[in-house]
Amino acid sequence: MNSKVKEIKLLKSILLVYIAMALVIAGLNYGYVDRATPAVAEFISWLWHFYENWIKMLFIVCGSFLTLRILSPSVRTAMRERNLQGFIIFALIVHIVGPAILGISELYLFSMPLPWTTTPLQLYYQEGSFYLSRFPLWGATGISAALTFYFLVSVIVLAGTLLLGRRWQCSTLCLFNGFASEVFSPAFPLIGKKKKVTPVIIKLFSVLRWIFLLIALFFSLLWLLVALNMPPGFSLEFLSQIEVYKYLGTELLATMFLWIIFTGRGYCYYCPLGTVLSFISRVAGQKIITDKTDCIKCNKCNQVCPLAIDIKSSAEEGLPVQNLRCVGCGHCIDSCPTKTLSYRTSFLERIEK
């Protein structure tokens, strides 16, 4: 067995441990902690935060190192290296440095903007369980700091996407699915061989994309009304629980299931934040340039694209690729043997000129 095969097996093992720990600890945190004794509940809460912060950080660093070893020197890794550097830096801020400075171990809850999560907005509902459980721990100052961090991240994501396209969030900052899809990319799928994404599957994900966007916008609007002191006339506590179940079932569990049988970017097909950012990326002029040299029709770009975008057909004619599914990961660019491809936005083109 050569070293590359061993390293892939090790990477798959790390990913499997990460998934198993997430399922077990999340199950305890969301399903058992309310029925546990105070001492056990406190331990479970500590274990969940330790996993989310320190274990996740460790796996990001180790997985990044292994992925680069597996890929090099078979392909160029310039884009991959920048992706992984971005995830490591942002993870350090969200999971290690930020919590140490602010004293908030759950800072990761505030690292994804609307419409992906409304959890930060629930702090405006002072009668809700989220506010009542955090206020004794954080105080008014801590809650203000967490919300400030949330709005700062939201501004950074929006401004960065307008300048650098969807790549900024989905392939550099996303600590839900984006990081795993890059850090563990050679390990997918965990079971079986890489599967071809058929037009039927793409259509199914396209339908799911709009369904999840509408659901996310619905929750976002309701909690924005709460933040503006205009609460709707029904139980907000029930609404909060529904969102928890949605996260656990259709996002956390579904995402990890797709890692096991499909691809690391499975959730990216229907992520509501990704859908919004894809339209902003259109405004930013995001595209893959295909005419730097001549396309030799090797099809490597199509083979490595995690979102099943047909890049080769455009490259054969020298036409730019503009697809709402593109997360700007750069796998196609790194894999092109003739360096025909490059990632561009209007801002990047101005910088280059």
Image (spheres, grey):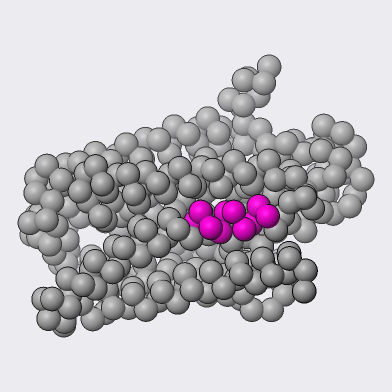
Front in this rendered view, residue 67 or 228: 67
Quadrant containing the N terminus is bottom right
Q: Position of residue 170 (x, y in %)?
A: 52, 48
**What residue appears at the point 86 percent right and 40 percent down from the top-left corner?**
338
Is 306 drawn above or below residue 336 in the view shown? below
Establish if 187 lies above or below 158.
below
Q: Residue placed farthest to the top in the image?
A: 353
Q: Left or right: 342 with respect to 24? A: right
Rendered location of residue 35, percent (x, y): 16, 82
Q: Does residue 265 show up?
A: no
Left-right relation of 227 to 72? left
Is most of the magenta stretch helix, strand or loop?
helix
Left or right, 326 with respect to 291, comes to left
x 61%, y 69%: residue: 10
- Quarter of the figure that contains the C terminus: top right
The picture places residue 85, in percent across and down from the top left corner, at: 54, 43
Span highlighted in magenta in the image:
60-69
Q: Is residue 314 at least partly visible in the picture?
A: yes
Q: Residue at x 24, y 66 (%)?
A: 46
